Image: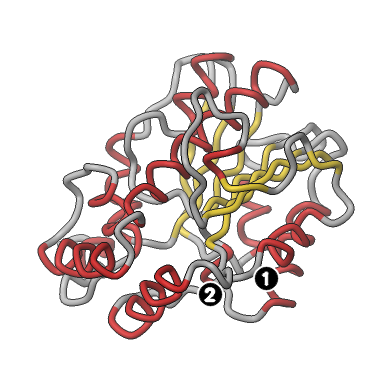
Amino acid sequence: MTDIESRIDTSRPHTARIWNYWTGGKDNYPVDREAGDRIRELHPGIGAYAKADRLFLGRAVRHLAEHEGIRQFLDIGTGLPSADNTHEVAQRVAPDARVVYVDNDPLVLAHARALLVGTPEGRTDYLDADLRDVDTILAAAAKTLDLAQPVALMLLGVVIFVEDDEESYAIVRRLMDALAPGSHLVLSHTVTHPDMADVDAAVAFWNEHGTPRLTQRTPAAVARYFDGLELLEPGVVSCSAWRPDTATPDVAMYAGVGRK
């Protein structure tokens, strides 16, 4: 058994594996499917969040590569590989695009090494690190990316795992401060809202039974991650409403793209 395999805990449900289950993937275990079904009972629309967030990733990366000239992507909190990963979308537009994936989930890392293979013209690398390890991430990313040139920082559904508000804002600021002007922040985050009691119930169930624990924030609190950046239209909105290809219902996952 490899070191990565020894770190995979199949006794408790895990966020990345449940997300994978909801999006139709096969990289999950019975404990994940059981928890995923229970959460879906509490909030029937939860599966749509995972799909909406994934579609947002594709639209944001495609826009940055096609219209903003971004050729470098730092994707932290990658999650399990599925269709249209960051490097696939970016390199479809620009074969020379470079992508660094960062995650500390052993199952994600095991699959990433096998599946996330980029184009010959570009580069795709992977890093085993926690979002909080900012210095480690930047030092390792600099081996593949030129941090003196614009980079798209991808933080989809990951700062929800930093419970302290000020710590989470500080992490995002430190990462963006290290990137060149013209860089972009792409971020999504589960929100809490008075009209979404079922979402709160689902999160409460997750935090009691699953790992890692997650923190909801209000839409205004999510918008604060973009302080000091130029928000691209339509601003911080439900990720399903960020430049959708077709009209889809809003979900309690808010997202935005901001330019440094």
Q: Who's the residue at 23% across and 63% down the image?
A: 36
Measuring from the top left, give residue 76's x and y in whole percent: 54, 52
Nearer mark to the viewer, of 2 and 1: 2
Residue behind mark 1: 168
SS type, badge 1: helix
Q: Who's the residue at 44% across and 40% down the image?
A: 54
Q: Which mark is residue 215?
A: 2
- Badge 2 or badge 1: first in the primary sequence: 1
Q: Quadrant of residue 136?
A: bottom right
Q: 25 and 38: which one is in front?
A: 38
Measuring from the top left, give residue 248's x and y in whole percent: 47, 35
Q: Who's the residue at 67% across and 26% down the image?
A: 64
Q: Quadrant of residue 100?
A: top right
Amino acid at circle 2: Thr
Q: Seen in the image, is 123 located left or right of residue 174?
A: left
Q: Quadrant of residue 160?
A: bottom right
Measuring from the top left, give residue 146's x and y in whole percent: 73, 34
Amino acid at circle 1: Ser
Q: Seen in the image, is 38 located left or right of residue 217?
A: left
State the separation of the CA atoms marked 2 and 1.
Answer: 11 Å
Q: Seen in the image, is 153 located left or right of residue 210?
A: right
Q: Who's the residue at 21% across and 69% down the image?
A: 38
Answer yes or no: do the residues labelled 2 and 1 have beta carbons within 8 Å? yes
